[in-house]
């Protein structure tokens, strides 16, 4: 009986992609925790320029937490400290923004965007989307003929995060800064006021959280050891068809 062929190993992620992934992952975790602590200072969200206790909010923390505050196990720091939370938030917001900028520049230079994330018109056809969705339901996440290629749902979600959600969360954060309002007053006009920017910032953050949850679920379904190893070393073991 012939021995089974060794698994095919390919290089899937460049060093720049791996570095950006982990820097962003750490930054987002700390930004989420510190952002929730900042939200504790005034757990209501509004539209427009102004917002205060007696204005009509569209969101209240008290709907989710009896104390109208996010519990300490979800926040950074764990005890109420608005000044410290703002320091953490500002520092890692800068880390996130400059890491994204560097990643975009490098990905344009090494053609990562053009090679891996470019969306062909044929991939958006109804038939292609349905076929890819059925493959996902069958837990088949890669193309056996081109295992390095991203599927259409990966391309759409990654493009949405990189080019829409992350820039939005960065610029709405800048719009809430009095210093940036003086330098770039047009930011507030774009988002319809400071409170609108705060609300959009919150909504986009929740969409990023949803992306992270789906992303982690798919990593687990696809094989967490191989997926995490590929993001650490760049090398990915292609699943055999009988294992896929």
Image (cartoon, rainbow, N blue to C red):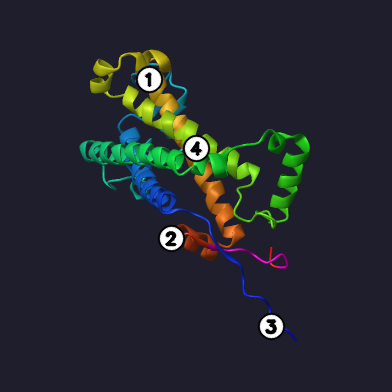
How far apart marks 4 and 2 lie (CA) works out to: 21 Å
Q: Nearer the viewer, mark 4 or mark 2?
A: 2
Q: Residue at x 38, y 35 (%)?
A: 68
How far apart marks 3 and 4 lie (CA) works out to: 43 Å
Q: Quadrant of residue 40?
A: top left
Q: Mark 1 points at which residue?
A: 195
Q: Name the residue under label 2.
A: 232
Are the residues at dot 3 and dot 1 in contact (C-beta closer than 8 Å)?
Answer: no
Among numbered discs 4 and 2, the one appearing first in the sequence: 4
Task: Name the secondary structure under disc 1.
Answer: helix
Q: Where is residue 219 in the image (x, y as percent from the top left)?
A: 56, 56
Task: Name the secondary structure under disc 4.
Answer: helix
Q: In this view, does 90 lie above or below 4?
A: above
Q: Which residue is drawn at 49% across and 42% down?
A: 111
Task: Name the secondary structure under disc 2.
Answer: helix
Among numbered discs 4 and 1, the one appearing first in the sequence: 4
Q: In this view, does 72 lie above or below 6?
A: above
Among numbered discs 2 and 1, the one appearing first in the sequence: 1
Q: Name the residue under label 3.
A: 3
Q: Where is residue 244 in the image (x, y as percent from the top left)?
A: 69, 63
Q: Residue furthest bottom?
A: 1
Q: Mark 4 points at which residue?
A: 161
Numbered range of the magenta stretch: 236-242
Among numbered discs 3 and 1, the one appearing first in the sequence: 3
Q: Nearer the viewer, mark 4 or mark 1?
A: 4
Badge 3 crowding class, 10 Å Cα cut-off, few under 14, some 14 to 19, many 20 or more, is few
Pick the quarter of the image with the N terminus: bottom right
Left or right relative to 226: residue 140: right
How far apart marks 4 and 1 lie (CA) works out to: 23 Å
Left or right relative to 209: residue 144: right
Among numbered discs 3 and 4, the one appearing first in the sequence: 3
How far apart marks 2 and 3 lie (CA) works out to: 29 Å
């Amino acid at each position: 009986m012939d021995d089974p062929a060794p698994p095919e190993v390919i290089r899937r992620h460049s060093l720049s992609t791996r570095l950006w992934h982990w820097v962003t992952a750490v930054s987002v975790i700390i930004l989420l925790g510190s952002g929730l602590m900042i939200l504790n200072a005034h757990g209501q969200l509004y539209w427009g320029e102004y917002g205060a206790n007696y204005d009509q909010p569209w969101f209240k923390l008290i709907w989710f937490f009896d104390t109208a505050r996010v519990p300490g196990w979800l926040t950074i720091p764990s005890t109420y400290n608005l000044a410290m939370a703002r320091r953490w938030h500002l520092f890692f917001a800068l880390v996130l923004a400059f890491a994204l900028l560097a990643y975009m520049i490098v990905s344009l230079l090494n053609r990562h965007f053009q090679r891996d994330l470019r969306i062909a018109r044929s991939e958006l056809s109804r038939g292609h989307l349905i076929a890819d969705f059925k493959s996902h339901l069958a837990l088949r996440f890669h193309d056996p003929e081109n295992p390095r290629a991203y599927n259409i749902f990966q391309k759409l979600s990654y493009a949405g995060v990189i080019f829409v959600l992350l820039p939005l969360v960065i610029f709405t954060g800048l719009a809430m800064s009095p210093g940036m309002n003086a330098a770039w007053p047009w930011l507030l006009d774009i988002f319809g006021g400071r409170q609108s920017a705060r609300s959009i910032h919150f909504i986009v953050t929740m969409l990023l959280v949803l992306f992270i949850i789906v992303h982690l679920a798919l990593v687990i379904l696809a094989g967490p050891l191989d997926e995490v190893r590929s993001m650490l070393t760049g090398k990915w073991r292609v699943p055999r068809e009988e294992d896929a």
